[in-house]
Amino acid sequence: MNVQTRLEANAILDRLLADGSTFSRNDARRLIDLIPVAPSSRFSFKGIFKGSGSSFRGHAAGLGNVELNGEAKERTLTFNVPASHKIGGYVVTHTPGSINIELMWAETKADQTGLSCLLVYDAPTNEPEELRIAAQTSLTLLIFTFNYVSYVPWKKPGLA
């Protein structure tokens, strides 16, 4: 994508995600045309595994008990994830029938609710159907917590 296309797409994204219960059909159609389509896959996975860093406790003369904590370890695992594009403050992934729009800093937040949305459209006609917003739910089993994001209805296309 060239600079002019990215600037136009960024302006459209800002308008689509502005407050309100509807969005412009024309803006959505234009965004569908602008963002290159990546092949869809039946299954893809993107996960972040976090662990605590090392720590050390001891006694320092004149200071008393001290504790040093190392940096937390983090590993990212991806499998079969489609190509994405960085546009302004957004990361956009376009697969047939949907465009995933995520705030660039979304991965730095523990709760993903409201930090991404999905523009759903009819693939054969490129007609926008709705915008869905992210809602995170957590499931805890013993010592493991699994967070997953689902997309719930948010906005419908306006008349024009």
Image (tube, rainbow, N blue to C red):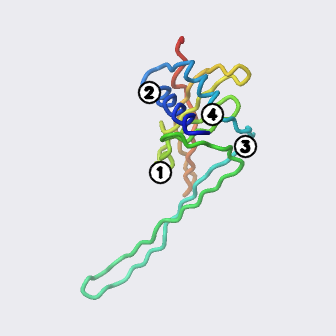
The residue tagged 2 is: 18
Closer to the chain start, of discs 4 and 2, is 2
Residue 55, above or below 22? below
Question: Please, what is the three-letter code of the amino acid marked with disc 4?
Answer: Ile
Q: Secondary structure at mark 2?
A: loop
* Residue 82 on image: x %, y %: 68, 43
Tell which residue pokes out farthest to the top in this image. 159
The answer to whether mark 1 and mark 4 are in CB contact below 8 A is no
The answer to whether mark 4 and mark 2 are in CB contact below 8 A is no
Q: Separation of disc 4 and disc 3 at Cα?
A: 21 Å
Q: Separation of disc 4 and disc 2 at Cα?
A: 19 Å
The residue tagged 1 is: 108
Mark number, residue 43: 3
Indicate which label's residue lies in the foreground, 4 or 3.
Answer: 4
In the image, what residue occupies the spot 56% across and 18% down?
25
Q: Is residue 158 left or right of residue 79?
A: left
Indicate which label's residue lies in the foreground, 2 or 1.
Answer: 2
Closer to the chain start, of discs 1 and 4, is 4
Closer to the chain start, of discs 4 and 3, is 4
Q: Secondary structure at mark 4?
A: loop
Question: Please, what is the three-letter code of the amino acid marked with disc 2?
Answer: Ala
The residue lying toward the viewer, choosing from 138 and 77, is 77
The residue tagged 4 is: 35
